[in-house]
Amino acid sequence: MCGIAGIVANFEVSGSLYWALYALQHRGQESGGISTYDNGTVHKYKGYGLVSEVFTSDILQSLSGKTGLGHVRYPTTGGSKPENIQPFNFLFRGHSLSIVHNGNLVNTNDLRYEYEGRGHIFSTTSDTEVIAAILANELIHGHTVGEAISFCMRSIRGSYAVIFMLDGVLYAFRDPLGIKPLCLGEFEDGGHIVASESVALDAVGAKLLRDVAPGESIRLKADKVYPRQIMTAKSPAHCVFEYIYFARADSVIDGISVYDVRQKTGFLLAKEAPAGADIVSPVPDSGTAAATGYAAASGIPFREALIKNRYTGRTFIMPTQAKREMAVRMKLNPVRGHITGKSVVLVDDSIVRGTTSRRIIALVREFGAKEVHLRVASPPIIAPCYLGTDFPTREELISNHKSVAEVREAIEATSLAHISLEGLVEAIGVPCSHLCTGCLTGKYPLAIDGEEEESHGIEMIDPYKNPEL
């Protein structure tokens, strides 16, 4: 649940990194940071807050260099501590290493223990530092960068999209299942960018070239990209929650328009779970595309029953339940004329804990809605995510221990229905075997202690092939 970006270009990159991170702000609102490289010196700045709060024009001007990377963070592994704000920056054996990571490793503790046994001292509690330790250890022992990346990818398990800068050279690699998104673009005037979502490329005027392939690593220069396939799997396992909620609706992830997916989920949801109502309204903003689809399929007029305050953040990714609950009323305000005396279909992207849904429904009822039918553009979330989305325990998930009927009663909706898993998969447009649906099924695409695995057959290619990397 983070956003990352890296740029190498023929121009100063700090301003473009700022706007790339600004476009990725929805992926993390706790903290942000940028590191740049200029003539042997790493310039860096990071802090708590939104991108617009962390950086000023003077700070950006001080981050000189034509190569750099940045990060916006939401804490999953490691917790909310100042030392965990990325990018991480290290010096060793005359080298400088800066690194950012989106994802979550499932063997972090084992790797930390192993490298502590070798004398490595960790200064953070983040799994990203484990990745940095593996890379640095390989380089210290005389291996090439390509060999270090290969060894690192053989060692770590979980979800990861990684960008790192070694002595001013920019590299990136993605886990062999492609769980977390990572795309590649180019600037018209020379230069390349790699980032979590295509919206970051749009923000800086770069052209989307393609996604970084699952299991691929790349070295980026301003005028060329050097790709290398390190690992393969019999099928990818793209995170289904990126399409449900997490990615921005205007992103294209692994060749699929997120907006189109969400609109189609609403269309199919109306077919699967019709409701007699006067209006269809989204829970903004992540329910908007699905609500337009529901309205189109049902013939019920689309009206906004709730208006979002654009100056509040995303309640789901706020770090505490108390803050999430307090934010609901600050974030949403009803349009009285649209809902008083009306039967309303509210369309939302998902139900995680249930508390926010209950408060939204109460708010709509408070302003005069006669009925509130909740339609959800994802199946019930029944299992934890170990791979980077913040619903880590079954106890937190209302659908894990309650039936749909019991959830409806708990959130006080007139009726409640979710899209089926089959409908969601149809809307995304790829086989279910190409998605990670662990949070919806309890079956995961890689081995996790105590959980059921659906193996995707990950294999190494020649780990030392193409040393040009």
Image: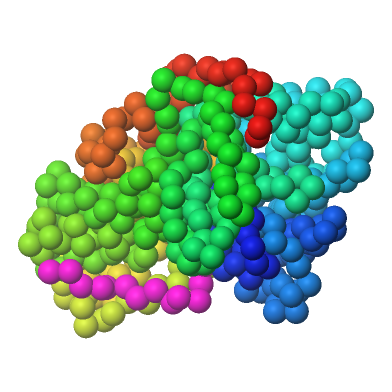
Is 253 rendered above or below residue 460? below
Q: Say whether residue 364 is magenta.
A: no
- Quarter residue 208 falls in: bottom left
> Which residues make up the magenta segment?
301-316
The image quadrant where one finds the C terminus is top right
- Quarter residue 259 falls in: bottom left
Residue located at (68% from left, 68% from top): 12
Q: How many marks?
A: 0
Residue located at (66% from left, 21% from top): 464
Q: Residue furthest bottom?
A: 337
Q: Nearer the viewer, residue 67 or 323?
A: 67
- Quarter residue 110 falls in: top right
Q: Can the viewer see residue 108? A: no
Is 231 rendered above or below residue 63? above
Residue located at (32% from left, 52% from top): 257
Is 318 rendered above or below residue 405? below
- 7 vs 167, left or right, is left
Q: Can the viewer see residue 432? A: yes
Residue located at (64% from left, 70% from top): 15
Q: Where does residue 352 sit, x and y in percent of width and height? A: 43, 47
Q: Where does residue 426 sit, x and y in percent of width and height? A: 23, 38
Secondary structure mainly formed by the magenta segment: loop
Q: Say whether residue 313 is magenta.
A: yes
Q: Where does residue 448 sit, x and y in percent of width and height? A: 56, 23
- 50 vs 127, left or right, is left
